[in-house]
Amino acid sequence: MSTSLYDKLVAGEEKLSLIGLGYVGMPIAVAFAKQVKVIGFDINESKIAQYRSGVDPTYEVGDEEIARTTVDFTSDETRLREAKFHIVAVPTPVKLDKTPDLLPVISASKLLGRNLTPGSIVVYESTVYPGVTEDICAPILEKESGLRCGIDFKIGYSPERINPGDKVHRLETITKIVSGMDEESCAEIKRVYDLVIKAGTYPVSSIKTAEAIKVVENSQRDINIAFVNEMAMVFDKMGIDTNEVIDGMNTKWNALGFRPGLVGGHCIGVDPYYFAYEAEMLGYQCRVIMSGRRVNDDMGNFVANAAIKKMIQAGLAPREARVGVLGLTFKENCPDLRNSRVYDIITELRSFNIEPMVCDPWASAKEAKEAYDVELVPVDAIRDMDCIIVAVAHNQFKQMGLEKFLPMFADGPAESHVLVDVKGIFNKKELEASGLSFWRL
């Protein structure tokens, strides 16, 4: 294989394609378009129409950036034949039984394979367990294209590390792991990514190593959060404020500073299952990782039941109570609803015949209805509430301050109103002074 693909990309003689234009793929496409010719492909025609009209539904780069980008957005798969360097950034969720759902990456491989041309390099960014790129994706590319991997085209893996909603740790400022099927492909992939990654790239010896890095770094974070979540559940029984404990702990130089909360989304709430699945296929049971997953998956139910208990203590009949839930996305300041654990709170409330009013200024009402059968309402509609659960720490909620939440409650004594502060966005002394019956994780 020629080693000059990088030079041809820079010279405008070849194009780069991005398959999958979501929270990960779209920012990558936009970044590369400032350096080379880019074809941005997605099977979702409505999404392509939004990008073409200058609208960024992910809020990751913003409408202004989308409007001026030179990315050639398309839903026509045959356009991929114009490119030689391909990046696959499709989601890899889990099934209901928590086993990996590789259908999106398999489908993307079939689609790309049908349009793959000799001399191409294919880099996968989708989170997978070690072995998927070489053992599953590469054979599909070969079958669909009729080309031979390692001779007619080469493959690599570079795990995505984009943190949706994070305006500090961006694509360009996060060190990028890169790998290739051999030294030549790894060197070429590194050169291409170096065009946009200001923080630098970090090549590793094999594709499997790069795949492992991704699932392990998120599994580690998951376990750390599970630890503080378990502590929070114990402290709740002890009558100790978890945030105060963590604040004190953080005065020590080697404290990790993790906070309790709901762990969802497409990475931390998913990747540990990919790692554990492959380990089990090899005969090893991941006890620590899966224990952490069980703790974190139970947090929604724990919060909902804490709210029910607090309502009863405040003299309310939960079945008759009006409950508002603020926030539905999986994390703050991000429109991503995938794998939101706030839905666990809603589901548990529904088991008590409580149908909460839910608002989220970041989320799509259409997606909320389709994914969770939740009708989103504007924040102004949260009125005459008996209980308010602030589930996501969106800036809009944090900036309101406690005084703007008080009018959301129904008439009556403050002690009969319940405020559940999942992320600890309110000052504890202010909560105590308000007279509200409050609970925080």
Image: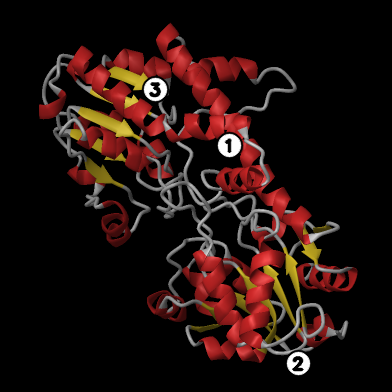
Q: Is residue 71 visible in the rendered structure shown here?
A: no
Q: Is residue 42 visible in the rendered structure shown here?
A: yes
Q: Does residue 107 appear left or right of residue 49 in this picture? A: right
Q: Does residue 402 appear left or right of residue 185 in this picture? A: left
As drawn, 28 above or below 209: below
Q: Quadrant of the C terminus?
A: top left
Image point (54%, 64%), residue name: 61
> Label 2 vs label 3: CA separation?
58 Å
Give x and y (percent) for residue 371.
Answer: 32, 56
- In depth, the one of 266 and 60 nearer the eye is 266
Q: Which residue is mark 2?
A: 13
- Crowd class of label 3 (few under 14; some 14 to 19; many from 20; radius 10 Å): many
Hey, which quadrant is residue 320 in on the image?
A: top left
Q: Quadrant of the N terminus?
A: bottom right
In the rendered structure, are the residues bearing label 2 and label 3 in contact, judged by CB atoms less than 8 Å apart? Answer: no
Q: Label 2 amino acid?
A: Glu
Which secondary structure lies at badge 2?
loop
- Crowd class of label 1 (few under 14; some 14 to 19; many from 20; radius 10 Å): many
Q: Label 1 amino acid?
A: Asp
Q: Which residue is mark 1?
A: 222
In the rendered structure, are the residues bearing label 1 and label 2 in contact, judged by CB atoms less than 8 Å apart? Answer: no
As drawn, 92 above or below 144: above
Which secondary structure lies at badge 3?
strand
- Crowd class of label 2 (few under 14; some 14 to 19; many from 20; radius 10 Å): few
